[in-house]
Image (spheres, grey):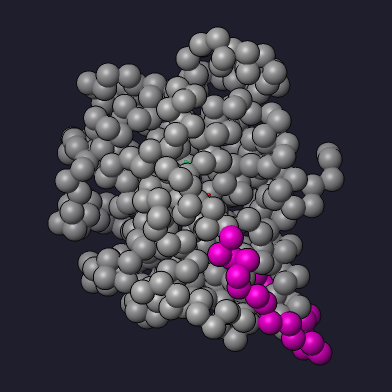
Amino acid sequence: MPVITCIDDLKRRYRRRVPRMFYDYAESGSWTEQTFRENVTDFAEIRLRQKIAVDMTGRSTATEMIGQPVAMPVALAPVGLTGMQNADGEIKAARAAEAFGVPFTLSTMSICSIEDVAAHTSKPFWFQIYTLNDDTFNRAIIGRAKAAGCSALVITVDLQVLGQRHKDLKNGLSAPPKLTIPTMLNLATKWAWGIEMLQTKRRFFGNIVGHVEGVSDPSSLSAWTAEKFDPALNWDKIRKLMDMWGGKVILKGILDVEDAEKAAAIGADAIVVSNHGGRQLDGALSSIRMLPAIAAAVGGRTEVWMDGGIRSGQDVLKALALGAKGVMIGRAFVYGLGAMGEAGVMKALQVIHKELDVSMALCGETKAGSLGRHNVLLPADFLDRYR
Ligand SMILES: Cc1cc2nc3c(=O)[nH]c(=O)nc-3n(C[C@H](O)[C@H](O)[C@H](O)COP(=O)(O)O)c2cc1C
């Protein structure tokens, strides 16, 4: 096993191992990528407050997310096409999350199906729904998630239309990849990825191919979203989905105090302050910058989590200090998965956990649940630079 000390080490190995098309798919944001970049760089504006001579023994990062015990308040975010980053990727990531003791969220746009992931794990995972303009499908997939024992439904509310990522269009992103000459030349340099991929049958959108008809190109994410995602989603429909599910619900993709108020009012168990990893509205503020106001407004009524830009345990600490009760990570675990499969996701979690634990100690804190505004120093205008 190579010496991996940080998430960037995993990212470098990931870049070498995975075909360009899928690396670019993960490592990009929409349009100019401003929001994608600022999700990361805004964390650097926040500084940690060092404390000394505090008893640091008996530390614990363990807390709860929607009442579920977690080894640290970090859940794996839903990531489409995870099974293209590494063969059977969703199963591998779910198994690593289970072994580590954090929640895994399966995307609607996954390669491995809900049933497949359930068959290869022993604890309940969460299911993320993208609502299609097809009620029969929505009802059926919710039924399948229930039958598979999923313990929460994550409803993604920020993708009624798809933000454009230039690289995906230029690369002709599809699952499985179409064998054009540039793709074949690139695949020839990714033989370890290819050998594993040839050994699995899971190379299509496992939750939807065969369950929905009438898409012009079933291998294309953009065709699915353009033709089948529901551009008419509204709060009534969200409420109906919550009723259909009847269990714990997390609304993901809230970036505005007014929307957070509505989410709390309809009874979401948690909301995720998120801009979809900078993949939707380019020019929106970073999640970490929007978090404090949203946490202050609704944190007493619903659990407020955030995602976007988390690449270290220090980032997790900063988010918890600014009011999040938990966070989700997307790319950080994808880098690990692409680099080294299940062991790489485990490594990503271990890296983040160690960084969180040691940083907590150096901030004079022994419990993740006690982190707060007192642990960070902010530029004078951090909270109100943009109004
Ligand atoms: C490659 C990729 C695919 C994604 N697919 C989905 C998805 O299928 N459903 C969803 O709700 N969010 C999806 N997201 C957004 C993530 O759930 C999460 O909000 C985002 O990755 C957080 O930012 P981070 O990657 O900087 O941690 C995706 C993100 C990436 C990078």
Name the one closer to the observer, 289 or 270: 289
Q: Which residues are magenta?
A: 41-64
- Residue 123, percent from left and from top: 52, 49
Left or right placement of residue 110 versus residue 56 in this view? left
Name the one closer to the observer, 359 or 64: 359
Q: Taking 199 as reference, is 85 above or below it? A: below
Name the chief secondary structure element in magenta: loop
Name the residue: 38% across, 24% down.
220
Considering every residue shown, the one lying at the far bottom of the view is 53
Work out which quarter of the rendered image holds the C terminus and state it.
bottom left
Name the residue: 75% across, 70% down.
358
| Residue 138 in view here | no
- Residue 34, percent from left and from top: 48, 52
Q: Taking 78 as reference, is 68 above or below it? A: below
Give yes or no for residue 55 being in the magenta stretch.
yes
Work out which quarter of the rendered image holds the N terminus and state it.
top right
Left or right placement of residue 246 versus residue 302 in this view? left
Name the residue: 45% across, 22% down.
172
Quarter of image, res 53: bottom right
- Residue 318, percent from left and from top: 59, 71
- Residue 147, percent from left and from top: 35, 41
Name the one closer to the observer, 299 or 20: 20
Name the residue: 27% across, 52% down.
245
| Residue 378 in view here | yes
Left or right placement of residue 217 versus residue 151 in this view? left
Quarter of image, res 274: bottom left
